[in-house]
Amino acid sequence: MVTKLRVLLQIAWRNLFASWLNVIIGLVILGGTFLVVVGGSALDSLDRSMSRSIIGSVSGDLQVYAASSKDKLSLFGQMGGGDADLTPIPSFARVKEVLMKVPNVRAVVPMGAANAIITSGNTVDVMLARLRDAQKRMQAGDASAKAEVDSLKAHVHHIVQVLKEDRKNADKLVDESAKDPRAEEAIERVSKDEFWAEFDQDPFGSLEYLENRIAPLLSDGQMAFLRYFGTDLDAFAQAFDRLQIVDGQMVPQGHRGMLLPKFFYEESFKLKHARRLDLIKEEIEENHATIAKNADLQRMVRENMTQPREILFQLDPLKTKEAAARLQKSLKTNETDLEKLLVQLFDTNDQNFQEHYRIFYSDLAPLLELYRLRIGDSIPIRTYSRSGYAHSANVKVWGTFNFKGLEKSPLAGVAAPMDLITFRELYGYMSPERRTELERIKQAAGAQDISREDAEAALFGGSGEDAAGTEGATTAIDEAALFDSGGAARAEETTFTQADIDNGIFINAAVMLKDPGALSQTIQDIQAASDANGLGLKVATWQEAAGIIGQFVQYLRYALYVIAIIIFLVAMLILSNAVLMATLQRVREIGTMRAIGAQRGFVRMMIAIETLALGTAFGGTGLALGAGLVALVGHSGIPAVSRQLYFFFGGPRWFPEVSVTNMVIAYGIVLVVSILSTLYPAMIATRVSPVVAMASDE
Amino acid sequence: MAAIVSISDVYKDYHLDKVVVPALRGITLDVHHGEFISIAGPSGSGKTTLLNLIGCVDTATRGVVSVAGQDTGKLPESKLTDLRLNTIGFIFQSFNLVAVLDVFQNVEFPLLLQGKLSAAERRKRVMGLLEQVGLANHARHRPSELSGGQRQRVAVARALVTQPQIVLADEPTANLDSTTGQNIIDLMRELNQKQGTTFIFSTHDPKVMKHAQAVVMIADGRITGRTTPEAAALHAAGGAH
């Protein structure tokens, strides 16, 4: 038997390279196994690195939410935008108590996510808010505030003069009819010294005039979408230990407030010029891009050169002079006009970029507000609840954060963690204080009606710019009303206890496990505990909870399987056909073997072993090549060239590993395909009669 | 002496589509141990069909074919295969060597199928035969590296390696030039005389026939006579005109 097998193997081996057809089939098999090994290993590694990212930054190992929810939990938001419709769960304390008794559960962190629109005011808005603040303090008897008021007044006056200058230039390009007489009038009035002389007689009236008429004329205001989630911040920081504070501090225990993702903070609040310089620097240093060759970088340089306004607006007359002097010296030029100096500063190329970058940060930046929102400031968060009510709250930003290893990933910090108490209010959860506050808001809304008429008139009669302006005006009034009523402002400063956090609604909760490997068992345990205690919870794995992003790898895997199956099906058909052809070519040989005493089983074996040899040889080569490639790449790692990749790679570099499972699977498939494809040819071969051996040649 | 091959009143029909083509029409023939006989007749006379029946690669439509005492019509396919393997050696018109195996392996092949001998015994047996057919120096050559005569000598060695009782050769010289064909027949005769193996070969070549002890003349599926080689050769030569 062994010797028989030996001669069969020998025949198989010799036949392997006897025909070009075999080599081609072999290459198909080789390609198939190569793909399965490389693709499978890559996806496995991607799955691992991504799970690190998602588990470590958003979801935890598992998520629980109300089983009665209409939609499925989707931590990154839903496909068509908007949030999943989830039923709030009334008491976190109860859920925590039950879940913590499940042996494998390490921590339970309550959560609830929502989207908000935040409007960061433009430069004048910021100035005016500060002016209002200083004015109040001055009236309250703070003597030091006087100097601040004067400086701010001078600054706003300066801005208006720059604005006027600007519009004079712009007017040359548009004809008379496109001008807005109300805007002209406002600028004219505010740029005159009389306005400022009269300012102190009615400071708040003047402020309101500036807020309503001047602020909207500056186009550098920003609207941003913010995704936030309410959570027990301390528990969150503990459970998600890759969280690190970058600027400012963690929200202190028992205090209201939020943290902003560092990436979001930079993108949304940093002075555009500075942000663009940072981005150019990063591209040059990390991706070895050059301004000369990269169109994106050229665009950023151009934008910096053509929009010096934003910087000019920020500087009062004194600082303008100082800035000009510093730039003159650093750029070694006689130019005195700051605008032209700025253009010169931002006109960067690959030779002078680093130098100009340094000048910007050492000379100019100290004179500027680099961030529109300072750490410690509050931002008005406005969100729409399911009931249709708009809820808003001023939420203090205590600091910015990111996740270790995912610093550059925008996805790892898509949502801003906020204290759960504020979240509940924004969610529409009616606390007693909230009820009374709502009354106040309604009153404020009554006052808003008047200005809405203005808005309509502007909408149907005026230019788009003006319409936007009136919108700004309503916002300003609304906020002013809120501030004056003091409700939100006071709520912002109240503190709360752990019991307040625990005894209240939440939407979903992250569950961290002691042993993440025992995922499916723990899901069952949690489900059982929930059912036994009537909590009505639904358990989702991190993949399910992360929605599309979490299942991204799963989809890729399906795609890979489909491709692999197609390849192998095709391989099987070709293989079967080729083996059949080879068999028919060898009818005489087979007939001879049968004549001199080979049984049918021997012939069947011969065909099977030949195809197996083909599969083994080429499949093995594909396997080795695939594993080799993965090992090679895994050794040095693949750098995350785009920001998005940081998240999928779980860090700046990705190290795929050879997966033994994938190799075994790939090899198994090859062998099965080989065997299957010989069935028919082998059957034909066994039917070859020994008589054919006796037939004479054609 | 008992006949090693005994054929009595055998008919063989072939079916071509719906037409029945009779190939053998009532053949009766005994071949005795140690004979060296030739089956002669024109193309289509039924020579090959008769050899197929004797060689157990085919079975009769009617009548009894008995080989080494076994009625082949009553044996299942696998038993017929065993009978071929252990009792009969084959030499084919176009040699039919396995192209991917070398000379030694080709000759060894039936022994591997038998699985009775050890590697050393096989080696001794194969090399001994290659010695006899004069190809001991070519043991590691592939068939494609040999001449036609050499290939047929390899086939002869392969046919004899299992020490069969009967060797069947279907037109063994048809693809060889006359000198080489002569040598093959001489070799067969020599082995027949030395080892007493029964040889049955078909041919239509008078020069080959004359080496036979007896010639069975066949035409239209019937035996027309059993004569001496000389008479047969005369007959064939006459018939050839």
Image (tube, coloured by chain):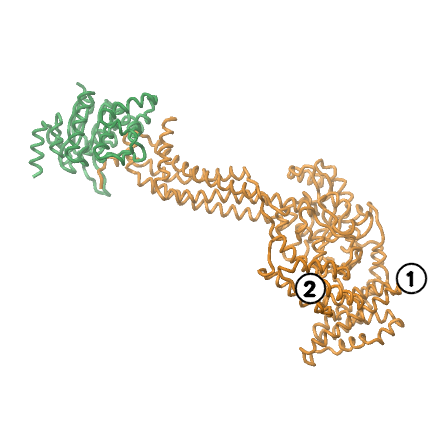
Chain colours: A orange, B green
Q: Where is B139 relative to A346, above or below?
A: above
- Secondary structure of the residue carrying numbered label 1: loop
- The tag earlier along the polypeptide, 1 or 2, is 1
Residue A192 in the image, given as x and y percentages of width and height: 82, 76
Q: Nearer the viewer, residue A670 or B194?
A: B194
Q: Residue at x 69, y 49 (%)?
A: A68
Determine whether the residue tagged by mark 2 lies in a helix, strand or loop: helix
Q: How many numbered badges does the structure rendering display?
A: 2
The disc label shown at residue A345, or none: 2
Q: Which picture quadrant has residue A142?
A: bottom right
Give whichever of B100, A696 is nearer the camera. B100
Point out residue B143 in the picture as x, y percentages from the top left corner.
27, 34
Identify residue type, mark 1.
Answer: Asp
Camera sees residue A128: yes
Percent across and percent down for residue A345 are 69, 64
User: Viewed as shown, does residue B175 lie left or right of A132?
Assistant: left
Mark 2 is surrounded, within 10 Å at the Cα level, by few (under 14), some (14 to 19) or many (20 or more) other residues, namely: many
| Image quadrant where one finds the N terminus of chain B | top left
Mark 1 closeness class: few <14, some 14–19, many ≥20 residues within 10 Å: few
Is residue A496 shown left or right of residue B167? right
